[in-house]
Image (tube, grey):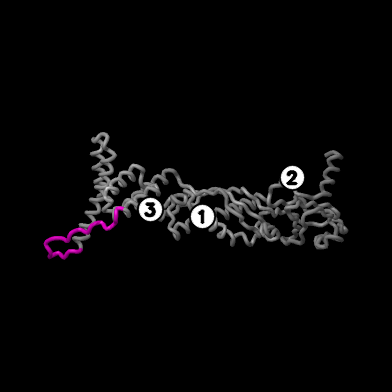
C-alpha cells in the first residue's frame, strides 16, 4: 500500500457517515469499532446514529455534523478506553433510517387452506410488498444485536418471515371465521380486510423492536389454475344444488338436463330453446321428486294414497332474482341464465 493510500485511509477514519451504497438501507452498521476522539460524524436528515457497547445503547446523535468530543457529547466518556490516554473509544455505531421504507417484497406458500364453500383443502400462495417505519431506533438496534442480526439483510429477511407467518395464520383464520369462499379471496374481494387484519396481527410481533407496518401493498393470494377450475366447478354444483332444493334433487335435474341436451344435438337451430327447456324440466322434475318424497314421509303407512305434493311457493320474481345472483357470481353462464330467465318470464 502506497503513502497516498495510507493518507486516504487515515482521512476516512476521521470522518464517519453512512456509506453511499447503503443509502437505501434501514440499518447500516459502521464497520469500525475503534473510534478516535474529535472524529467528525455526519448524520443525514432522515436517520439517527446510535452508539452501542455490550448490547446497550449508550447514546444517540440526531441529524447534523458532530465532532466526537466528551466536552460537547457527555455520553462518550462512558466509552473511553483508559489505555489510550482518552484519545480513543470503542463502540458499535448504527445508522438507523426513520423514514417510511416502501416496496419491501415478500412471498411464499401459505399452505393448504380449507375452502368453506366446498370443504376442499387447497394449496395457497401469497406475494406482494409492504412498507415499514422505525419508530424507536433504540429498541430495534438492541433487539437486532440480541438476535445476532446486525446487518440490514439479516433484519429484512427476519421481518419478511414475520409478515409471511402472520399472513398465513390470519388468512386461514378469516376463511374459517368469516366463511369467505377461497375464490373470492383470490379474486381480491377481501384485500382491504386482509390488510387490516395482517397489520393488526403483526403489531405484537414488531412492537418490541420499535417498528410499525404502515401498509401492505399489491399483495395477492393465489392458487393453481387447476385448483381454481376445480373450485369453480364444485361451487357451481353447490349453487345448483341449493337452487334445486338439495343434492338428490340436483342429481335428478342433472339427469333430465343431460337428456334434453341429447335432444338438442339433433334439433338444429332450436338447441338453445331445448336446452333452456331441459334445464327447466330438470329442475321442475327434481322439485316434484323432492316434494313427492316429503309428502310420502308425512303420510302414515296405513293411508292408501299420499297427500298431493305442495307447489313451489317461490314466486317467479323471486326465482328470477335467484338466478340473477347465480349469474353475477359466475355460477351460471350467459346462455344458461337467458334460457332459465325466458322460462320464468312466461310465468309472470
Numbered disc 1: secondary structure:
helix
Q: Picture quarter containing residue 2?
A: top right
Residues at marks 2 and 1, CA–CA distance in whole angstroms: 37 Å
Closest to the camera, between mark 2 and mark 3, is 3
Q: Picture quarter containing residue 147?
A: bottom right
Question: Residue 335: x percent and y percent?
Answer: 34, 42
Main SS of residues in magenta? loop
Numbered disc 2: secondary structure:
helix
Residues at marks 3 and 1, CA–CA distance in whole angstroms: 20 Å
The residues colored magenta run: 298-316
Circle 2 Cα neighbour tier, 10 Å, few/some/many (<14 / 14–19 / ≥20): few
Farthest residue, direction right: 85
The residue drawn where x is 37% and y is 47% is 327
> Which residue is tagged 1?
168
Locate the N terminus and report the quarter of the image it occupies.
top right
Question: Residue 26: x percent and y percent?
Answer: 68, 51
Nearer to the camera, 86 or 194: 194
Q: Can you tell which mark lies on residue 55?
A: none
> Which residue is tagged 3?
118
> Which residue is tagged 2?
20
Residues at marks 2 and 3, CA–CA distance in whole angstroms: 54 Å
Amino acid at each position: 500500500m502506497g503513502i497516498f493510500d495510507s493518507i486516504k485511509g487515515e482521512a476516512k477514519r476521521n470522518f464517519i457517515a453512512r456509506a453511499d451504497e447503503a443509502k437505501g438501507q434501514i440499518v447500516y452498521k459502521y464497520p469500525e469499532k475503534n473510534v478516535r476522539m474529535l472524529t467528525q460524524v455526519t448524520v443525514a436528515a432522515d436517520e439517527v446514529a446510535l452508539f452501542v457497547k455490550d448490547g446497550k445503547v449508550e447514546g444517540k446523535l440526531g441529524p447534523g455534523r458532530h465532532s466526537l468530543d466528551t466536552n460537547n457529547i457527555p455520553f462518550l466518556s462512558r466509552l473511553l478506553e483508559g489505555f489510550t490516554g482518552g484519545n480513543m473509544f470503542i463502540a458499535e455505531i448504527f445508522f438507523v433510517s426513520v423514514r417510511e421504507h416502501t416496496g419491501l417484497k415478500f412471498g411464499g406458500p401459505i399452505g393448504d387452506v380449507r375452502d368453506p364453500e366446498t370443504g376442499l383443502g387447497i394449496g395457497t400462495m401469497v406475494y406482494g410488498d409492504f412498507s415499514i417505519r422505525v419508530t424507536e431506533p433504540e429498541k430495534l438496534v438492541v433487539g437486532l444485536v440480541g438476535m445476532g442480526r446486525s446487518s440490514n439483510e439479516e433484519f429484512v429477511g427476519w421481518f419478511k418471515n414475520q409478515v409471511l407467518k402472520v399472513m398465513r395464520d390470519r388468512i386461514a383464520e378469516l376463511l374459517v371465521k368469516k366463511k369467505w369462499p377461497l375464490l373470492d379471496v383470490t379474486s381480491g374481494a377481501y384485500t382491504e380486510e386482509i390488510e387490516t387484519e395482517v397489520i393488526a396481527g403483526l403489531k405484537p410481533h414488531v412492537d418490541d423492536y420499535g417498528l410499525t407496518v404502515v401498509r401492505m401493498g399489491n399483495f395477492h393470494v393465489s392458487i393453481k389454475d387447476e385448483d381454481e377450475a376445480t373450485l369453480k366447478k364444485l361451487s357451481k354444483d353447490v349453487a345448483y344444488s341449493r337452487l334445486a332444493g338439495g343434492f338428490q334433487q340436483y342429481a335428478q335435474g342433472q339427469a333430465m338436463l343431460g337428456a334434453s341436451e341429447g335432444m338438442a344435438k339433433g334439433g338444429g337451430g332450436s338447441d338453445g330453446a331445448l336446452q333452456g327447456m331441459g334445464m327447466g324440466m330438470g329442475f321442475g322434475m327434481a322439485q316434484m321428486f323432492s316434494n313427492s318424497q316429503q309428502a310420502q314421509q308425512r303420510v302414515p303407512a296405513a293411508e292408501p294414497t299420499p297427500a298431493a305434493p305442495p307447489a313451489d311457493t317461490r314466486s317467479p320474481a323471486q326465482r328470477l332474482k335467484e338466478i340473477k345472483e347465480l349469474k353475477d357470481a359466475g355460477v351460471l353462464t350467459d346462455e344458461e341464465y337467458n334460457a332459465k330467465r325466458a322460462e320464468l318470464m312466461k310465468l309472470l
